[in-house]
Amino acid sequence: MITFRILKKALRSRARLGIMATPHGAVETPAMVGVATQAALKCLTNDEIPLTKTQILIANTFHLHLRPGEQLIGRAGGLHKFSGIPVPLMTDSGGYQVFSLGFGRDTKTGKIAKTAHKDAEASVGRGAQPKNIKITPDGVRFHSPIDGREIFIGPKESIRIQQKLGGDIMFTFDECTSPFVSRSYIEHALRQNHRWAENSLKARSTDQALFGIVHGSRFRDLRRASANFINGLGFDGFGIGGDLGDVTQEKRTMINILRWTTPLLDETKPRHLLGIGLIEDMERIVKEGIDLFDCTEPTRAGRHGIAYTRAGRIDLSKAIFLGDKKPLDPQCSCGVCAAYKRNYLAHLIRAGEITGLRHLSFHNLYFFNSAVEKIREKIKKGRM
RNA sequence: GCAGCCGUAGUGUAGCCCGGUCUAACACGCCACACUGUCACUGUGGAGAUCGCCGGUUCAAAUCCGGUCGGCUGCG
């Protein structure tokens, strides 16, 4: 079980400062959740996790089910004993893979579209199915990316797997929707997601926390209905999921979705915005009442040669940095910026050295977590 | 000195025997762009070789023939 205590509410926004206590430690919120899909913060050792100011991680049900399998992790005593990870763990339900391996893959889009949505074009109508998976009333039939075998995951299966994995916080199995679906599709998917939320709750038989996920895409009435419905089911916390509009008007739709929903959710429980958290998004979503968010950006960008700095992103694979003797970010107090310069890091990245990926991942996590830390300070000092 | 093998983008190779479908392929590298509940040390795209050089045969040569230069190996 978890407990959530709000230490302070911001005066000028819906931001909250809190502490979430879990069986594996406490988390100061707002917090960024590091993404550890395969029960590893990619490129980093367990010792390094706290050094990046990472307080909590999220692992993935779909991926761990495929490999090594929840039975093996269960026999090892659960994710914490199996991995030795020294911070609390969440498990994502596999619902995101319904999107990333489904419509997301078909249309090569993310959950925030890069172009404005036009209802007339590229809309997926009610009853449509993605090319490579099949969404049924009881769950989703996937094909394993490893060996092609069919994998069925629904709410019951996901909860069963997540209970074997033994994370501190579980999520309900849902269908993460695409930004390019029609209203009629979303109406149907919402009813299904609500039923799956109820079935996830019924399937739970441990004292692990379970977060229910609010859906409704870009539609105000559907988002509000979903927030009310999910709020009424008695979850331990909330996820805000599904597609979040597009990048136009500085992601206005995403912020609107939070404005429509967070005021309807039990304020004593934590709210997690699923899959969001670029530096530019952080303060805005916290101001709308978000306590937790997870984002692959710091680690993925790091592995792709990108470092975050106060002056913006820099791509260390560019030859120009071979002549740059500055640290990644001159104002950063992380171990990487203390020990290494851009020229050497650029060399490591260009040479494909694994430590280069480690250094950038470490720095980016520290950079992101420091930004969240500053936001907590602002709330504490009443400046938000 | 003789014989054999080899010489194709920055690098390593495929194609050559059985000329046209080679406006020359692949891998790595290079350049650009992308990446928000990670199928992700990934993905997409681009630039880059007139096929060692000269000549011949042919309607047509990276491909056949002669010469030549360079490399490797063997024999002397």
Image (spheres, rainbow, N blue to C red):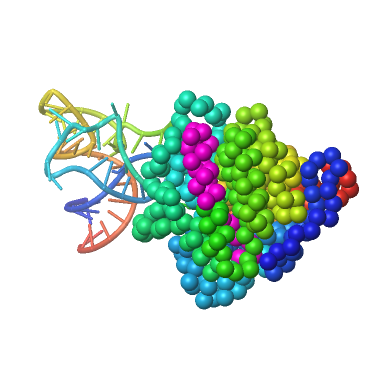
Give the residue displayed 47% in from the left and 67% down from the top.
A69
Residue found 58% across the figure and 62% down from its top: A40
So how many labels did they put on this image?
0
Left or right: A254 with respect to B35?
right
> In the picture, which quadrant includes the N terminus of chain A?
bottom right
Q: Residue A257: x and y, percent? A: 65, 38
Instruction: Provide residue A234's location: percent of width, then percent of height.
Output: 65, 56
Residue found at x 47% / y 25%:
A120
Q: Quadrant of the C terminus of chain A?
A: top right
Tell me if A75 is positioned left or right of A362 in this view: left
| Residue A381 sits above or below residue A91 on the image | above
Residue A251, percent from left and from top: 65, 34
Please provide the residue range marked out in magenta: A167-195
Asked if the stretch drawn in magenta spans residue A165, the answer is no
Q: Is residue A184 magenta?
A: yes
State whether residue A9 appears in this view.
yes
Q: Position of residue A244 (x, y in %)?
A: 60, 38
Q: Quadrant of residue A233?
A: bottom right
Residue A316: image quadrant is top right
